[in-house]
Image (cartoon, coloured by chain):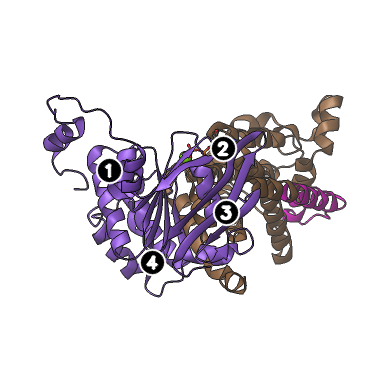
Amino acid sequence: MEAVKKHFFSDMGVMLGRSMRHITRSMDTIITVTIMPIALMLLFVYVFGGAIQAGTDNYVNYLLPGVLLIAIASGISYTAFRLFTDVQRGIFERFHTMPISRSTLLWGHVLTSLLSNAISVVVIILVALVMGFRSSAGILSWLAVAGILALFTLALTWVAAIAGLSAKSVDGASALSYPIIFLPFISSAFVPTESMPSVVRAFAENQPVTSIVGAIRALLSDQPVGNDIWVALAWCIGILLVAYFFAMRVYKKRV
Amino acid sequence: MQTDTAISVHGLEKSYKNVNVLKNIDFTVQKGTIFALLGSNGAGKTTTVKVLTTLLKPDSGTATVNGFDVASKPDNVRRAISLTGQFAAVDEIMTGRENLIMIAKLRYLSNPRRVADDLLRRFGLTDAADRRVSTYSGGMRRRLDIALSLVGKPQIIFLDEPTTGLDPEARIEVWKIIKELADGGTTVFLTTQYLEEAEQLADRIAILHEGRIIVNGTLSELKRLFPSPKVEYIEKQPTLEDIFLAIVGKKEGK
Ligand SMILES: Nc1ncnc2c1ncn2[C@@H]1O[C@H](COP(=O)(O)OP(=O)(O)O)[C@@H](O)[C@H]1O
Ligand SMILES: [Mg+2]
C-alpha cells in the first residue's frame, strides 16, 4: 500500500501524458471544442447581434461568458467518451491488475479535462479579443474568473464521469452534454432574461448558468458581483459533490 | 503452502446477481508450467480469470496467487501477475512503442525505452513501432497486448482466450510466444475454447463445464480418460489451416 501511495504522482504523470496525447491527436476534438463556440460567437455578434438588445454597447463582452460555458460543456462530453472507451477496451482492467493507485486512473481523466478545457477557453478568449472583447478587470478578478470556470469544469467532468462509466454505448456516453450545451441558450448568456416569457424566464433565472454567467460578466467588467458569485459557487460545488459521489459509486460497482 | 505452487484455488464460488457462474472450483497450478482452462462460451473462464487477477472478489472459497490471497492481499498479487484480457487492451490512439513505454513507466522500470525496444523486436513489431495501434492488424494487436503483459517480467501471466478471433497464422505465432514464456520459467494460465490449443500448449488441462471443473489432468491422463474414438479409414485431407498457411506464407507485420 505504501509503495502504491508513493508512486501516486508518477502514475498520475503517466496517465496525464496519455490523455494529453489523446487530445492532441484527436483533431476533431479540438476543432469541435473551440471552433463550434467560436462560430456561435461570430454568428451571434455579426448576424443576430444587431437585433439583440442586451443593454451593453459591446455585445462580445456580454456574450463571452456564455460561449465559454458552452465550450466547456462540449469539452466534457469527450471526457465521457474517453472514459467509456477505456472501460470498453479493457484498459481499466489492465491497469487494475497492476500495482498502481486506482484513483490515478480517474484523476488522470479529470486533470486532462481541466487542462484541455483551459486550452480551449484561452483560445476562445483570444478570438474574442480580436472581435472586440475588452475587459477592465484586474488580475484578481481574472483569477476569480479562472477559478469559477475551473470549478464549473470540475463539476461537469464528474457528471461526465458518471455517463462515461455507466454508458452502454458511445452515443450514450456523449449524449449527456447535449442538454448541458443547451442550458446557456435558456439563460442570460445571449439575451437578458427580462425579454423572456414568464415561465421560461423563471427557469432561466434559477438555473446555474445564469448565475455563473452573471458572476463572470460582472468580474470581467469590473462591476460589483453581488449575490451571483455565491449562487454560482453554490451551484458548482453542489453539482461537484453530488456528481463525485455518484461517479465513485458507479466506478466501484463497475470495477 | 508449497513453494512451487503458483496458483491454488479451493472451493471457489462466484455468482452474478442471479447467475451462479462458478460452483465450487478447485485446482492448483505449479510454477513454471502452462495450465489451460478449457471451456465453451459462457462456461465461466473469464470470471475465473477475473477472480484470480483481483478484478472480482470471490463469494466464497479461497484463491491464492504467488502465495497471496487475492481478496485480502490484492496489491501483493498484482506485483506478481499480468493479464492479457479477452479483448486486446491496447491504447489505439498511441503507437505501439508509446503503449509499451507507458506500461514500463507504470511498473517503475528504470529504462522504459530500452524495455520497449526489446519487446518490439522480440514480437516483430519494430517496423510498426511508431504507427498508431489503430492501424494494426488483429494479430499485431494481440502480440502488442501480450508484449504489454510481459513488461517488468511478471512471474505469472494470465491469458484469456489469447487466440480467439485470430487467423491461423497469427494463432501459431501466439502459441510460439506462449511456449517461449514457459521455457523462460514464467507460469502461464490460459483459457481457451479449443481442445487443440490446450493440447498444443498445456502441461495440465482443466475442463470447466457449467461452473464446475469436470476433468483436471495432464494431456496423457486426459487421453486415458477418453478412450480414443473408433478408428475410421479415411484419406487425410489437408486442414483448412494447412491450406491457409501455404497460401498466405509470411506476410503479416511487414
Ligand atoms: N457482469 C456480469 N453480469 C451478469 N452475468 C455475467 C456477467 N459476466 C458474465 N456473466 C455470465 O456469466 C457466465 C460466465 O461468463 P464468463 O465467465 O464470461 O464465461 P466465458 O469466459 O467462459 O465465456 C455467462 O453466462 C455470462 O453471461
Ligand atoms: Mg470469456
The quadrant where residue A50 appears:
top right
For badge 2, the amino acid type reads Leu
Q: Residues within 10 Å of mark 2 (few under 14, many from 20)?
A: some
> Where is mark 2, residue-wise?
A42
Judged by its main secondary structure, the magenta piece is: helix
| Image height of B163 relative to A147, above or below | above
> Where is mark 3, residue-wise?
B10
> Where is mark 4, residue-wise?
B153
Give left or right: position of B69 versus A228: left
Q: Secondary structure at mark 4?
A: loop
> Where is mark 1, residue-wise?
B171
- Which of these two is toward me, B171 or A92? B171
Q: Residue at x 27, y 43 (%)?
A: B171
Q: Quadrant of the N terminus of chain A?
A: bottom right
Q: Residue at x 47, y 44 (%)?
A: A89
| Image height of A134 relative to A8, above or below | above
User: Which mark sits nearer the N-terminus, 3 or 1?
Assistant: 3
User: Which mark sits nearer the N-terminus, 1 or 4?
Assistant: 4
Give the percent coordinates (x, y) of residue B162: 37, 45
What chain is tagged by disc 4?
Answer: B
Q: Secondary structure at mark 2?
A: helix
For badge 1, the amino acid type reads Arg
The quadrant where residue A166 appears:
top right
Image: magenta residue range: A216-244
Chain B tint in image = purple
Q: Name the mark nearer the viewer: 3 or 1.
A: 3
Same chain letter for marks 1 and 2: no
